[in-house]
Every structure is written in C-alpha cells, then in structure tokens.
Image: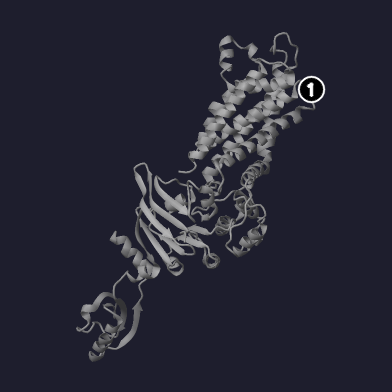
Amino acid sequence: MDATPRPHEPLHGFYTLFYKEWLRFWKVSVQTILAPVLTSLLYLLVFAHTLRNRIELYPGVDLDYAAFLIPGLAMMSVLQNAFANSSSSIMQSKMTGNIVFILLPPLSHREFFAAYLLAAMARGLTVGAGVFLATLWFVHVPLAHPLWAVVFAIAGSGVMGALGIIGGMHSDKIDQLAAFQNFIILPLTFLSGVFYSIHNLSPFWQGLSHLNPIFYMIDGFRYGFLGYHDVSPWVSLGVVAVSFLALSLLTLQLIRSGYKLRH
Amino acid sequence: MTPAIQVEQVFKRYGALQALGGVSLEVREGEFFGLLGPNGAGKTTLISILAGVTLATSGHARVMGHDVVADYRLARRSLGVVPQELVFDPFFTVREALTIQSGYYGLRHNKAWIDEVMHNLDLTDKADTNMRALSGGMKRRVLVGQALVHKPPVIVLDEPTAGVDVELRQALWGFIRRLNADGHTIVLTTHYLEEAEALCGRIAMLKQGRLVALDTTGNLVRAAHAGCQVDLRIDADRLPAAIAQLAVEHAAPGTWRLALKDYAELEPVLAALRTSGVRLKDVEIVRPDLEEAFVHIMSGH
C-alpha cells in the first residue's frame, strides 16, 4: 500500500455516472422498458379500436387512425420515460441517502447534468423505439421525413430529461414527485395532441394547446412520419430548442448551487 | 508543510439553529486525529463541510491546502469519507459499487487497488454479491472501501464502528492503522472513547458547535485529574484517622479511593496502615482515562 494519488482521466467521471444510470434502468428493464411499451400497446388497442373512423385528423386527408396514433404514443413514451428516469433516480438516491456517493467525488455540475440527462434520453428513446418495434407487425406507419422524427425525439427527450433532474432534486418524498408527474407531466402530455389532431378542438382549446410545449414536440415528431403538421416543424423546433436551452441553464444553475442536494 | 485539514472560523446555521459557531482547527499530515463530542455537537456537520456535502454559512475549510468550495475538485480528490449512515445502492454488487465509485474519481484502470481494498476488508468472497444481500457489518466494510478507492491522502471516518461486531472492529482498525503508517492522515469520530484513546495522537472536542478542547491525547488525559488516585482494600471497617482525610470515595465495604498529591505520598499511607495494625489486601492505581477527561471537559463548558 503506497499513498501516492493515482492518475485520473478527465471525462471518466462523467462517463461512469452515465454508465451507472444506464445500468440502473437496464437492470430493472421489465419495469423501465417493457412496462411502458405494454402500456402504449394497450392505449393503441383501446383507442385505435374505439376511435377508428370517428375523428377527422387533418382536413381533407384520408389517414388510418392507428398510423396517426402510433407516433404520438411513441413520443409520449419517450417524453414520460425520459422524465421518469432522471427524476426517480435522483429522488430515490436522496431518499435512501446514497446520493452521497455522487456528492463526494469531484464531479462538476456539468458532468452531473450531462450524465443524468443523457441516461434519461437513452431510456426515453429506448422505450420509444420499443413502441415502434412492437407495433411494426400490425400497423403500417409511413416515414415521410425521418430526420425530423429523430431531431424531435432527441430534443424532446432532452427537455423532459432536464425537467426530470429538476423534479428529482426538488422532491424529498415519493408523493412530491408523484404530484409533479400527475399534475404537470401527465396533463401536459395527454393534452398535447397525442390522441387527436388539434384541428378537432374549439378555437379556445386550440389556443391553449399552443401554450403547451409538448404539443410542439408531438406535432413535430409526427410530421417526421406522416408529413402532416398543425404547426410548421421549424416553429416547433424553435419552441423545443428554446425550452431545452432555458431548462438546461436553469438545471445547471440549480445543480451548481447545490439546490436541495448540498445543504 | 501544508496541513492535511485546515478549518478557519467555520460557522453553519440552519435557520435559527447554529450547528457550528466559529470552529478553527488544523490537522497535520500523517496524524491520527480524533473528533469527539456528544450527539449534536457538530462533528458530522464539520465533516460534511470538509466533504463539500454541506456548505458553510461562513469561514473556510481546506483539504491538503485546497479550498473545499473554490478548489473542490482537488479537495475532494484528496479526501475519502466514510459516512455515518449505512447507505448503499441496491442496484449493484460489491465490485460494481467499488468500480463505479472509483470511476467517479476519473480512475479507469483501478482493479488492482480495488482488489487489494476488498482483500483488506475481507470482502473478496462477497465481490459478486448484491449490496442488498449483505449484512450491516458487510455494508459498513463496503462503505469504507468506497472511501478508499481513490487512495485519498486524508481519510475521515464518521463513527465507523457504530453497531459493528468486535471482529470487524479489530480488522478495521488494523487496516486503518496500516493506512496511517503508510502516510494517510486519519480523522475519526467515535463514541467509543477507549478506541479514540488507543488510536488518536491528538483529539479535538466539540460541544454545541464550539471547540472546547484540542490537545494531544496524553495531555487531555493527564489534565483530567491533578495528582493521582489509588484504591485501597483493607481488612478493617474504618480507615486509620491519620489518612481518613485523603479519602474521596468509599466504593465498597473495606475499599476506599484516596486522592494523593503524588505517588510518593503512598509511603506515609502505608506506614499509617502498618502502625494502626490494619492489613492491606489490595492496592490499585487509578489511571485517568479519556472518558474521565471527556466528562470533565464537557461538564466544564
């Protein structure tokens, strides 16, 4: 045993935290991947069956409702699971006290942010891909502009991953996080046009939908598949990008100040 | 030489509660240093500030000369902390937990040292066991291992032996002593004062967030009572009148504790017994210990 400090590699700390988060959700993949994919399939089964031919999606367009619904469900899964990953991991670590293992090492606020964010995005995108894979067999979904779909999936999961970090840092108990999830995330995702096109809504609700950033994520993502949109994808991308930047800056600042982490 | 730990006028307030009220102290490199005090004295708060887990309200703390806030990367790289609470990550095995912890410090090829740490903590058999399946004592060993993965020059142990069996205590102290002999600075908090007395070269005592004593263990113990004390057991019901005024305690039938100015005074005591025809059955020198010093210091402040 000699007491000389060992050489260290600058990015390895960030990589390890990302890898730890990655392992964490893969080790319980039945809960973190399989369960949300199954939930989406149930939505598809119920809604596609009951709403088929009952709603007009885009004016003058003949489109299979299931093909409309699947991109929406996939994106909803991406968003909800990205949020769930970072928020529940941080909240659980705070509750059990093992957050100390992350607070003691020399990880910077940027490394902390990037690792939790990327792991959250990875989980969201994995679940989203899972929804597509599971539905591939029985519904044909067109792929009009794949690049747009990829860009919105990545940007959307980033927004929700960052929001999840804030949610996890803010919550000290499970019910606080559940409130965050049930009263903010769930209504925003459900009312974002996953199950319907906002053309079917009254002007008041259409206006309100435009205030919901998740609406732009869903609309932009769906445009990548169907080639139809309620709002120009460039506008949607702008909204999503600005949301991501603003949330990232806020999250970085909170981590740096030690908000509810370092007392 | 740069002190291993330097604490300057550190205050910590939680609302109206003052956890630390201006603590200053230095721990030299290579020391085995004790931090003692009753519950709520601020020991864990002070350790948390050194570790950067808690932010001081005012004042400065440095580890190996690195400020724990401004220069946190170097400060944290220099410090290994064994937290008081038995925390663990239920997702991982022992080896995973140690490898991940080592990775957080930027260390990629650290298997040899991790193996050595596991060997020294008797964890090799449990390397691939999930943390959830370990006993409390085993989890404690992993916590010690996690604090050592980056070979920190300064190691802080916050009550590492609370609720730990004798065997592990012995093994743990053997390992920590070897680390100390290899040049690591050790800071220890414990409620087992005999442990602190046996291990620590210097001791600081905290009470209600303030430093109330800081000296070598020997000086603290010697200051506990002036002069010396002996326990006498005799075959009589009363002490001879000539020495009765020396008694400070009548511990049991036929047993008295006498306070003497020095051990030379023992001779006239024995002479008095002899002239009174009292037979001495046993004599025991009462050595002052850290516990006595601790009680004395805590009651004086």
The kind of secondary structure element at disc 1 is loop
* Vertical side of B248 occupied by B28: above or below: above
- Residue A44 at x, y = what percent? 70, 24
Q: Which residue is mark 1?
A: A140
Amino acid type assigned to the residue bearing label 1 in the image: His
Q: Nearer the viewer, residue B129 or B147?
A: B147
Q: Quadrant of residue B296?
A: bottom left
The structure residue drawn at horizontal position 70% and vertical position 18%, both measured from the top left corner, is: A50
Q: Nearer the viewer, residue B177 or B31?
A: B31
- Residue B283 at x, y = what percent? 34, 83
- Residue B204 at x, y = what percent? 39, 61
Q: Nearer the viewer, residue A50 or B44?
A: B44
- Residue A34 at x, y = what percent? 70, 36
Q: What is the chain letter for disc 1?
A: A
For label 1, count other residues whose C-alpha is less than 10 Å away and answer few (under 14), some (14-19) or many (20+): few
Q: Dividing the image into 4 quarters, which one contains the C terminus of chain B? A: bottom left
The structure residue drawn at horizontal position 53% and vertical position 30%, both measured from the top left corner, is: A180
What residue occupies the far left of the structure in this picture? B241
Q: Nearer the viewer, residue B247 or A251?
A: A251
Tell me how the rendering is colored: one colour
A262 relative to B14 in the view: left or right: right
B110 relative to B62 in the view: left or right: right
A48 relative to B41 in the view: left or right: right
* Vertical side of B211 occupied by A137: above or below: above
* Vertical side of A84 occupied by A222: above or below: above
